[in-house]
Structures are given as structure tokens and as C-alpha cells.
Image: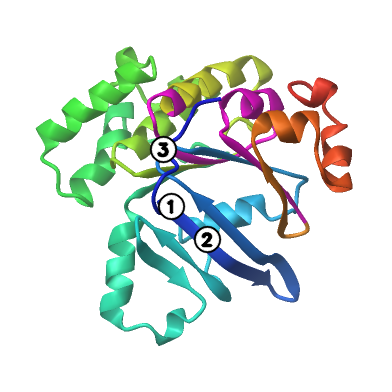
Amino acid sequence: MRKPNSGGSPIVKIDNLQKSFGSLRVLQGVTLDVHQGEVVVLIGRSGSGKSTLLNCVALLEGIEAGFIEVDHHVIASGDEQNQPLAGKSARAEVSLEIGMVFQSFNLFPHLTVLDNITLAPRRVRNIPAATADERAMDLLRSVGLEDKAGAYPVSLSGGQQQRVAIARALAMNPKVMLFDEVTSALDPELVGEVLLTMKALAENGMTMLIVTHEMQFARDVADRVVFMDGGVIVEDSPPDVIFENPKSDEARSFLSNFVGLGGSR
């Protein structure tokens, strides 16, 4: 486990977050802080609200109550409809500081790997093409795919596509990275290469909020593990505490499904 820079105010602050889909309340007052350089892993059963929480932070879902703050700027709040247009525009600008990688790779099939990575920096951040290409090649080297710059997604394995998706998110120079079950769609033999890429990001100090069922990865990489159940945070502890001595019956029951409280099910 790394030692994050936990001093000062958090880079991500979530307060009393509430979110419903119709009559179903998915998030029931979630409060969570993430500091610069910290890796926070969310675990829990399907339907516990983990992915919805990430989607709210990424502004892919609206919220009914509470607020989300990133880098000291409120990017979403329960009174969004009362905010002036200028305020909403400023929030959208701050939201560019958030990178997200999904279960599905979502690469553009008609673009090369290099073009997939450089598209958003060029069009959204107005970065010159040569500068964007140079940054993309650096990122491809960092994920071990420098030789795939001219390839199309269809020619890549699932693990390679997911590493390209990570490089694409990093190309926007985010301050926070969100990962939503990024290995769940991969064949078992491809999972390791993606987790190694994420471990390298953690070691380099990237602030990360991760949803995963890879318990050994959580144990090895997380600074804190947050267990969610029924739309609330039940436990928020260092990995050695939650895996060796979970406080709640819900966490003990969930973790009993994993051999040795980590790794294979």
C-alpha cells in the first residue's frame, strides 16, 4: 500500500450524494473524500451503487441531492436547475480534469490507435497535432503498445484495447482517473496486463477511484477500500483492515465469496 498525500483539502469531495432511477433510490446519501495521489477502490455486490457513483462523478448521470467537488470546484449539485449558465459552463471545464475508463473499450473502430488517443486533445483542448501525437506515443510506450500506433482496434486483443482506452483517457492530462470494472469484459489471461498498467499509474501518483471485483488487486494497490451496500458506504478502511477484519456483517458476507479474502472467487 502506498502512502498518499492526504494533507489539505481533498481533490474529490462527494457530500450527501443521492441518485434515483424512477422509484429506485440507488445512492442514499453517499459522502466520500479522495485526496491527491490516493487510490480508493470501491467494492460490493452488483447493484450496490458503485458504478452509479462513478457515473455521477464523471457527469454521466445527474443527481437529486448533495454535491460533487473536483479540484475545489463544484461540478454537480442537487440544485443544478437553479445554477446560472456561466456556472454550468465552468463546471463543464473542470469536468475535463476527470478521465474515465469503462468496461467496454469504446474505441472508434474507423480510427487508428494513434488517432483514437489524439482526437480529444486536438478537438477539445486545441492541442496542436504534432504535440498531441508526441504525447500519445509517450503514453503508448508507457502501456507497452508503441508498436500499435498505426493499428486499428479490430486487430488488437481485448487487453490491448483496454490499455489503449487508458492511454486515451490519460491524453487529456486528467487530475483524477475513474475505472469502472475495466477487466470484467476480458478473458482471464488478459486481465493481468491491464491491472499492471493501473498499478503503474498508482505508483506514479495518479489519483484514482476504481470499481473492481479483483480483490487481490484492491489489496495490493488501494490506499483505502470502500465497501458499498444498498446505496450507502458501509465501510471505508485501509485494505489490510477490511480484508482481514471487516467490521460489518455485510462486508464479511461479501468477502467470504473470495478465496482468502482476495484474488480468485
Q: Distance between the residues labelled 1 and 3?
A: 10 Å
In the rendered view of the protein, which quadrant contains the C terminus?
A: top right
Q: Name the residue under label 3.
A: 5
| Residue 10: numbered disc | 1
Q: Can residue 234 be seen in this view?
A: yes
Dot in front, 1 or 2: 1
Q: Left or right: where does residue 170 sit relative to residue 61?
A: left
| Residue 253: numbered disc | none
Taking the spot 29% from the left edge, 21% from the top edge, the residue there is 149
172 magenta-colored: no
Residue 70 pos. (x, y %): 39, 57
CB under 8 Å between callouts 1 and 3?
Answer: no
Q: Name the residue under label 2.
A: 14
Residue 74 pos. (x, y %): 39, 67
Q: How far apart are marks 1 and 2 (CA)?
A: 10 Å
In the rendered view of the protein, which quadrant contains the N terminus?
A: top right
Report the span colored magenta: 202-229
